Image (tube, rainbow, N blue to C red):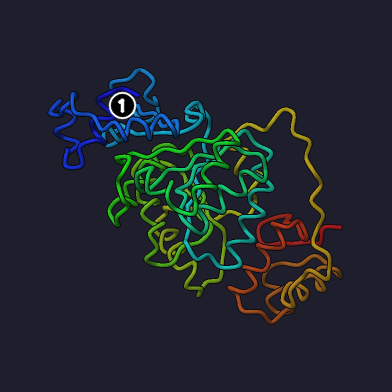
Amino acid sequence: MLPELIAYSSQPNLKLSDFKKGNYDIQNLDQKLINYCQEHNILGISQKDSGYPAQLRNYSDSPYLFYYQGNLDLLKEKKLGIVGPRLPSSYALEVMELFFKSAEKYQIATISGFARGIDQLAHELSLKHKLPTIAVLGGGFQHYHKSKDRLFLEKILENGGLIISQFKIGFEPTKRSFPQRNKLLTQLADILFLPEAKEKSGSLITTEFANQYHKKVYSVPAQLFSSSSAGIFQKMTENKIELISDFDYHLSQHFQKKADFSPSYIPPATISELTPSQLKIYNHLNTTPASFEELLVSTQLEYSSLLQEITLLLLNSTIKETSPGYYFLQK
């Protein structure tokens, strides 16, 4: 690592603005910090370096420098950003599982913020489906290395992943550092997926950055009056989020399919796996195809509940949509 990048982290009170002007002591480096970086293979890169990611040079507010572990070449790949709540609903967890069954077919590197909940699930599912993943940290490396998440970070690296942080190596996360992390994540991602968000969820900050940087943000239909998805509907009315149910189609608009991928057949859910509400839909469609309005009458489900159950049945290949709002049973 360049000595000046060590100098930046060696001096806790050194501001980035002063560092950029060269106002730092290159002779008084923290030897313990040097040893720490060498031990953990932590490197750094700044805008002065030719290897600084070209994608970040497109933004005037991208970080001047960042530290990293792992495969920096992943930043040259097409990247799918995934963000979401720390306490996701069971619906969001199921959506994530189904989403990754589609994502694994494509040449994708995933990128997320390594927070508990949806972020860490995104990294975990990436490893499960053999997709390289990038963790963007909300604090310095030392904070995460001394946490119980250290082994998870090591697992990401062992599987060819990348970990990056724009903060000093000893920096402890603050409320202000997480929006900065989300900004960097959005700058690096090509598109973003947000399975759910409450009205005042921190994840919604990412949609604002995405709108600023002209990045697509996708989500899925959910219960109309569910507090877990209130933020999604809010951003949808502002035209900042697009709701989708056909993951394959939308992923194919942004990413190349793997040439050597053998699609594994995903069987429709068996009857025993269906919820009571889904069983009502199944029983009707087992007799005849039907429109959304016809299913509303026959199942007597609330509009928002029917919408959510149909979305899940579409995602797990139990039913198909022949035209907007018209469904039949997949047999």
Q: Secondary structure at mark 1?
A: strand
- Please report the residue visible at 69 percent of the width from the left and 57 percent of the height from the top: 315
Q: Is residue 286 above or below residue 12?
A: below
- Left or right position of 18 against 259: left
Q: Quadrant of the N terminus?
A: top left
- Left or right position of 74 against 325: left
- Left or right position of 72 against 91: left
Q: Is residue 1 above or below residue 123?
A: above
- Please report the residue visible at 42 percent of the width from the left and 50 percent of the height from the top: 146
Q: Position of residue 66 (x, y in %)?
A: 34, 34
For mark 1, does the 10 Å Cα neighbourhood hold few (<14), some (14 to 19), or many (20 or more) residues? Answer: some
The residue that mark 1 highlights is 46
Q: Is residue 42 above or below residue 266?
A: above
Q: Quadrant of residue 279?
A: bottom right
Q: Position of residue 24 (x, y in %)?
A: 15, 29
- Please report the residue visible at 51 percent of the width from the left and 36 percent of the height from the top: 79
